[in-house]
């Protein structure tokens, strides 16, 4: 082996050594407290932010025996709290109450109380944007009820409360579309756009004590999702119902699966369940600076999930066309209800103003100062909704029809 080749091998070995990972700052994993969920509340009396942090308990999660410090029936997490004049100060005041240094990158959920949401959440956004350990993929939710209670709550089927909240948000979002599941990065981007306001999902804390068995032996859930919170700027201005949240999803192209019940066109006593599983929405700006109009077109498709009336659904006929018209009207009612509520609160959650800002900047420059207070609350949208029933499930008719 030549001296040149030997020198090259030593150089490669030295470079590889510099790339090897290691705990250069001596932050060993066993010395870290992994934060799984965080919540912010506001103490109005003392003008202080209050933070709740849920940490994984490795001893309880590992199933250790009581002789080793853990035991069966123990929570797999621990919740700590602190106060501060700013969100960052509250975070720093957590230090001194935990035996381990806090590690934030695994935080799944960000919960905000109604009090702090109505005060303003820009400071909390700033905290997450600036901090190295904070991740913008956390799922935010506005809490209606006692925030401390939900931070301590256990969820059936899940090891930690944070994991329960995380999966509850995902399941509800994709199966019913009654919760606006957005990560923090998307909310910050929305907040920065002219002519568009935030809509954040609502988490309701239930009255029943989490984990306490009822008389029939069942364990009530500690919380349920449904609805959302309207924002103007960084401040919450009101609540949206689950139906109105669905309407936002339809109108903005963000709905997934959703189910609604309509009356049968052949017999009003019979009800038909229809499930949507795909759709698209498109906004257009028509006209010029002196005469303009916004058009919103929503097209959906789905299938019949429940049908017990007379008639066949195997071919396109008057019955199926009537069902499509009724389904389209049900969707239209949801969108109009959402639009009416947003205009009442002067919160442009659909982003009609942002459409004008992008498509006609000169028009936006002309009307932007009057948009929130004058123009948007009186805005008329040309709304078109179409629904296409693709199939009727595994059978063509009803059980009664086949007898």
Image (spheres, rainbow, N blue to C red):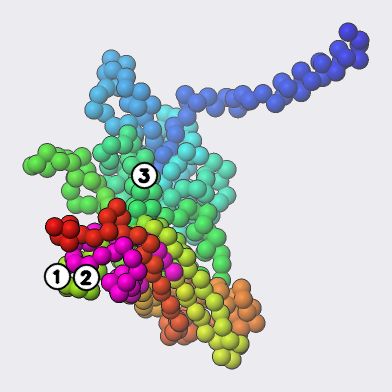
Q: Is residue 345 visible?
A: no
Mark 1 secondary-structure assignment: loop
Labelled pair 1, 2 in contact (Cβ < 8 Å): yes
**Badge nearest the viewer, 1 or 3:** 1
Q: Which residues are magenta?
A: 299-328
Labelled pair 2, 3 in contact (Cβ < 8 Å): no
- Where 175 sits versus 378, above or below? above
Residue bearing mark 2 = 264
- Is 327 colored magenta in this rendering? yes
- Where 318 sits versus 277, above or below? below
Farthest-out residue, top: 1
Residue bearing mark 1 = 269
- Closest to the observer: 145 or 92? 145
Q: Residue at x 17, y 73 (%)?
A: 268
Mark 3 secondary-structure assignment: helix
Residue bearing mark 3 = 167
């Amino acid at each position: 082996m030549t001296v040149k080749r030997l020198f090259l091998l030593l150089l490669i070995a030295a470079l590889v050594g510099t790339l090897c990972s290691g705990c250069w700052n001596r932050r060993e994993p066993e010395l870290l407290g992994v934060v799984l969920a965080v919540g912010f509340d506001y103490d109005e009396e003392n003008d202080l932010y209050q933070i709740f942090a849920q940490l994984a308990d490795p001893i309880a999660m590992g199933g250790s025996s009581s002789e080793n410090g853990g035991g069966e029936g123990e929570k797999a997490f621990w919740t700590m709290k602190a106060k501060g004049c700013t969100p960052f100060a509250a975070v720093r005041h957590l230090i001194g109450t935990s035996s381990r240094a806090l590690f934030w990158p695994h935080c799944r959920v960000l919960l905000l109380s109604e009090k702090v949401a109505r005060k303003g959440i820009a400071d909390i956004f700033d905290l997450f944007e600036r901090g190295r350990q904070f991740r913008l993929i956390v799922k935010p939710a506005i809490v209606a009820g006692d925030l401390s209670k939900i931070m301590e709550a256990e969820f059936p089927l899940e090891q930690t409360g944070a994991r329960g909240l995380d999966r509850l948000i995902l399941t509800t979002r994709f199966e019913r579309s009654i919760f606006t599941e957005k990560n923090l990065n998307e909310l910050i981007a929305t907040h920065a756009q002219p002519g568009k306001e935030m809509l954040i999902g609502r988490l309701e804390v239930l009255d029943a004590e989490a984990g306490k068995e009822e008389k029939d032996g069942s364990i009530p859930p500690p919380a349920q999702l449904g609805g959302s919170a309207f924002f103007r700027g960084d401040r919450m201005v009101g609540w949206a119902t689950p139906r109105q949240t669905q309407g936002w999803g339809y109108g903005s192209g963000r709905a997934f699966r959703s189910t609604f019940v309509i009356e049968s066109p052949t017999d009003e006593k019979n009800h038909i369940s229809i499930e949507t599983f795909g759709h698209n929405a498109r906004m257009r700006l028509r006209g010029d600076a002196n005469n303009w109009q916004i058009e919103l077109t929503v097209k959906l498709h789905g299938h019949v999930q429940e049908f017990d009336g007379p008639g066949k659904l195997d071919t396109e006929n008057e019955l199926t066309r009537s069902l499509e018209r009724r389904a389209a009207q049900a969707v239209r009612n949801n969108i109009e209800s959402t639009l009416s509520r947003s205009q009442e609160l002067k919160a442009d959650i659909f982003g009609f103003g942002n459409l004008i800002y992008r498509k006609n900047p000169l028009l936006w420059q002309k009307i932007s100062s009057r948009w929130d207070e004058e123009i948007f609350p009186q805005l008329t949208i040309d709304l078109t909704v179409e629904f296409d029933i693709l199939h009727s499930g595994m059978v063509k008719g009803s059980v009664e029809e086949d007898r």
